[in-house]
Image (spheres, rainbow, N blue to C red):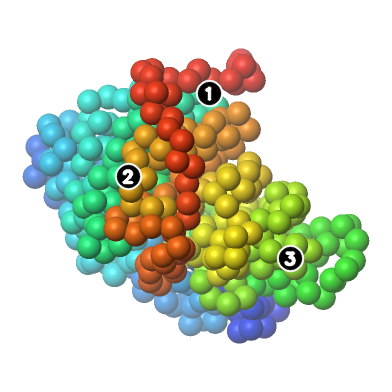
Amino acid sequence: MINIFEVNETNKMVEQENLDVRTITIGISLLDCMDSDLETLNKNIYNKITTVARDLVKVGQEIERDYCIPIVNKRISVTPIAIVGSAACKCPEDYVTIAHTLDDCAKELGINFIGGYSALVSKGMTTYDEYLIRSIPQALAETEFVCSSVNLGSTRCGINMDAVRLMGEIVKETAEYTKENDSLGCAKLVVFCNAPDDNPFMAGAFHGVTEADAIINVGVSGPGVVKTALEKVRGESFEVLCETIKKTAFKVTRVGQLVAKEASKKLGIPFGIIDLSLAPTPAIGDSVAGILEEIGLERAGAPGTTAALALLNDQVKKGGIMASSYVGGLSGAFIPVSEDQGMIDAVTEGALTLEKLEAMTCVCSVGLDMIAVPGKTSAATISGIIADEMAIGMINQKTTAVRLIPVIGKDVGETVEFGGLLGYAPVMPVNNFSCEAFVSRQGRIPAPVHSFKN
């Protein structure tokens, strides 16, 4: 039972340590909206979303006021649109009309983002999957709030290398479509291996087909809280370090549990999961890199970084699962470069490279996230980077992702500004040796031997 005393205990964390609930996300099934007529389909989607989520922003604001807990984003995720539009969409441009409908819903409701302009192609692509994927550059260029994701692999299925190759081209094309805005479209596009059905965080959120008609998922955040707690045990043993992280993660997650339960009650929508992920912001002191440095690294990226991140991720999960009845999504620690001032500083000073970030993704929540690379980076190289990250997820039975931004017209050493929670990022160098012959092979990389568990 959660009570007001637990909330009062967090007041200091809210006021001084950047604690917030990063998002309340309503997942909405659009399967009952499907129709063979495109106009009817779009009408059904608009009516369903604006009806189910009509009070989301109001309820979020009420909870903020009643409990003095900042709720940064109110979001919606929907059934992967490749599936929803399969009967009505005869070309990529048809799918773009659905993207506009989703954007209209976001504007009507006053939410921050809407996710689910997505396709699940871990083993193969249907015609409608390919239509949606090829529509992504135009859809993201012409909308403001729509986010897109594509799942390219899984431990059970292997990696769809045809889709990996295509997504390298789509990322480049999206960058070109939005080059007047520093290729911002790519910040709303992520590719996954082992994508979860209940992730509340953008740009990867979608409402899985195994989910209920509507669900409340909440994402918590508190890197600043963890860092402040660790400052009090500086120089202590690993046992004390781990216990401190676990206890702090417990308190942070209890806040998320309270918000989720309140939102569920007020909206009349079942509570789904709490995502425990430590999600940083560009604000000073709200940095996962700052936690790693407090653990004992001179800079994030120094030798020992992967071990420190593994420790952090594990203790966050151990503390968080005791504080919530349902934990899901991604849960752990995000390492987006542009959204974390400590990561930005580490890249600028040469402590953190793309290759080190890739190693860190073996033990963190997601993957290569919000990384700006030169606009001249080839589609094949982007596909190779995606393939590497998909392989890490497949072999390690975990979710991994790539959100690269090839910034058209910019090169290594320059900086790109995204604004808001997306922050800013130094353009990072990539390996210039070619992998084109590898990613041009057709077919898929088979599932690993440890996937056979039946």
Q: Nearer the viewer, residue 300 or 114?
A: 300
Q: Amino acid at mark 2?
A: Val
| CB within 8 Å, label 2 to label 3 | no
Q: Secondary structure at mark 3?
A: loop
Q: Nearer the viewer, residue 417 or 373?
A: 373
Closer to the chain start, of discs 1 and 2, is: 1
Quadrant of res 449: top right
Q: Amino acid at mark 3?
A: Glu
Mark 2 vs mark 3, CA separation in Å: 34 Å
Q: Nearer the viewer, residue 240 or 434?
A: 434
- Mark 1 lies on residue: 156
Q: Is residue 280 in view?
A: no
- The residue at 45%/63% (across/down) is 413
Q: Amino acid at mark 1?
A: Arg
Q: Secondary structure at mark 2?
A: helix
User: At which x and y percent is residue 58?
Assistant: 36, 74
- The label number, if any, that marks residue 171 in the structure image: 2
User: At which x and y percent is residue 288?
Assistant: 63, 63
Q: Nearer the viewer, residue 134 or 413?
A: 413
Label 2: how many residues lie within 10 Å, few (<14), some (14-19) or many (20+)?
many
Q: Is residue 267 above or below residue 211?
A: below
- Mark 3 lies on residue: 298
Q: Is residue 436 left or right of residue 243?
A: left
